[in-house]
Image (tube, helix red, strand yellow):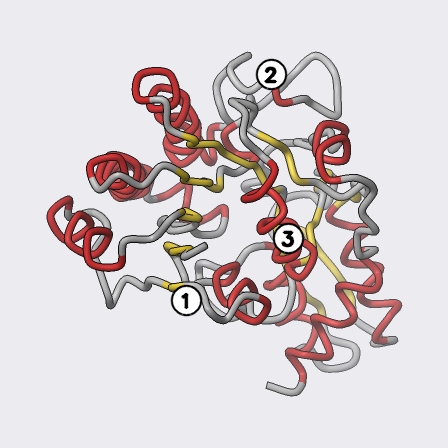
């Protein structure tokens, strides 16, 4: 199967490329997916049998909350063009990546399940981005129903690991954690956003890179399949785990700003029913591997 990966030079795309080097990996330098004609031309030229759609404008909680219009504009164009131009080019299989930001800010029971994706608005800090991911799921269902195309979606939780963006405003929490603790000197104080109380499921990048090809083969339904590890740790727990692993005497404080959702853990029950048991990387192991990788950059 000839597979085209959008966002092919991004964090997840690079991890996929290590395991599937013969696929096409499309970058923003190759094609501006916000432009419909460019998108159609590239898809028509490469003629892939399937597309794994990872491309999008992403960022950390601060950038996301301060640039809601830009995030909405870019991601709506990218997602709309990828699916529509793929259908015009006769590409019958598209597997698209969502985000847990697409799920409601608050649900009645946790972990939430795939069926709850429309049961309330996304969190305010990721409002626009969350809705663009939700609309990507809606669009995939629409093309399935109207055109009989095998367009499906999956929803990874927070992804971290070697190769992430560690030193910019786009850095997510774990990457920022690794960078700050590595640069901190013994006895220094390090400040993080929020209160340290929110809970997060952190998915190691190599786990996701192994699971995506399985989903390409097996996930053929309308379910926004959640890809999540079993651990659900608080921000402060994650900070303390890494400090204990690297044995650095560092003081930690929280600025009480932009805490984000208190929790957004998703169930992996339907994932494991589809792919079988999977041995997810424990956070304490994955974060140490990430820190060691970063220290050798």
Which residue occupies the foreground of this view, 180 or 159?
Answer: 159
Q: Residue at x 26, y 35 (%)?
A: 87
**Spatial CA span between label 2 and label 3:** 22 Å
Q: Secondary structure at mark 1?
A: loop
Q: Secondary structure at mark 3?
A: helix
Pinpoint residue 252: horizontal percent, then vertical percent. Answer: 75, 61
Mark closer to the chain start, 2 or 3: 2
**Spatial CA span between label 1 and label 3:** 16 Å
Q: Residue at x 32, y 42 (%)?
A: 71
Q: Residue at x 26, y 39 (%)?
A: 90
Q: Quadrant of residue 286?
A: bottom right
Q: Residue at x 50, y 34 (%)?
A: 153
Pinpoint residue 236: horizontal percent, then vertical percent. Answer: 77, 50
Pinpoint residue 296: horizontal percent, then vertical percent. Answer: 65, 87
- Image-based side of 209 in relation to 231, left or right: left
Pinpoint residue 123: horizontal percent, then vertical percent. Answer: 51, 28
- Image-based side of 101 in relation to 263, left or right: left
Residue topped by disc 2: 116
Q: Residues within 10 Å of mark 2 (few under 14, many from 20)?
A: some
Q: Quadrant of the C terminus?
A: bottom right
* Circles 1 and 3 in contact, beta carbons < 8 Å: no
Image height check: is 259 above or below 250?
above
Mark closer to the chain start, 1 or 3: 1
Mark number for residue 208? Answer: 3
- Image-based side of 172 in relation to 71, left or right: right
Q: Residues within 10 Å of mark 3 (few under 14, many from 20)?
A: many
- Image-based side of 78 in relation to 271, left or right: left
Residue topped by disc 1: 9
């Amino acid at each position: 199967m000839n597979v085209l990966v959008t966002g092919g030079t991004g964090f997840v795309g690079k991890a996929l490329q290590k395991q599937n080097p013969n696929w096409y990996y499309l970058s923003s330098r190759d094609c501006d997916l916000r432009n419909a004609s460019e998108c159609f031309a590239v898809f028509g030229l490469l003629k892939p049998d399937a597309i794994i759609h990872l491309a999008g404008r992403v960022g950390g909680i601060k950038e996301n909350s301060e640039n809601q219009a830009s995030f909405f504009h870019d991601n709506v164009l990218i997602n709309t063009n990828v699916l529509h131009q793929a259908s015009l080019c006769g590409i019958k299989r598209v597997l698209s990546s969502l985000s847990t930001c697409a799920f409601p800010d608050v649900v009645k029971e946790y972990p939430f399940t795939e069926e709850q994706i429309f049961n309330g608005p996304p969190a305010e800090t990721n409002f626009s981005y969350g809705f663009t991911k939700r609309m990507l799921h809606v669009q995939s269902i629409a093309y399935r129903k109207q055109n009989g195309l095998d367009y499906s979606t999956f929803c990874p939780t927070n992804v971290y690991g070697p190769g992430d963006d560690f030193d910019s405003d786009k850095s997510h929490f774990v990457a920022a954690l690794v960078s700050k603790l590595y640069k901190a000197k013994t006895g220094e104080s390090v400040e993080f956003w929020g209160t340290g109380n929110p809970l997060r499921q952190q998915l190691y990048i190599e786990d996701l890179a192994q699971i995506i090809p399985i989903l390409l083969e097996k996930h053929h339904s309308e379910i926004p399949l959640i890809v999540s590890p079993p651990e659900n740790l608080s921000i402060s727990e994650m900070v303390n785990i890494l400090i204990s692993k690297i044995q650095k005497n560092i003081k930690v404080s929280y600025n009480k700003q932009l805490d984000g959702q208190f929790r957004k853990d998703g169930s992996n029950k339907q994932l494991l029913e589809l792919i079988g048991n999977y041995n997810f990387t424990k956070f304490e192991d994955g974060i140490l591997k990430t820190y060691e990788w970063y220290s050798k950059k």
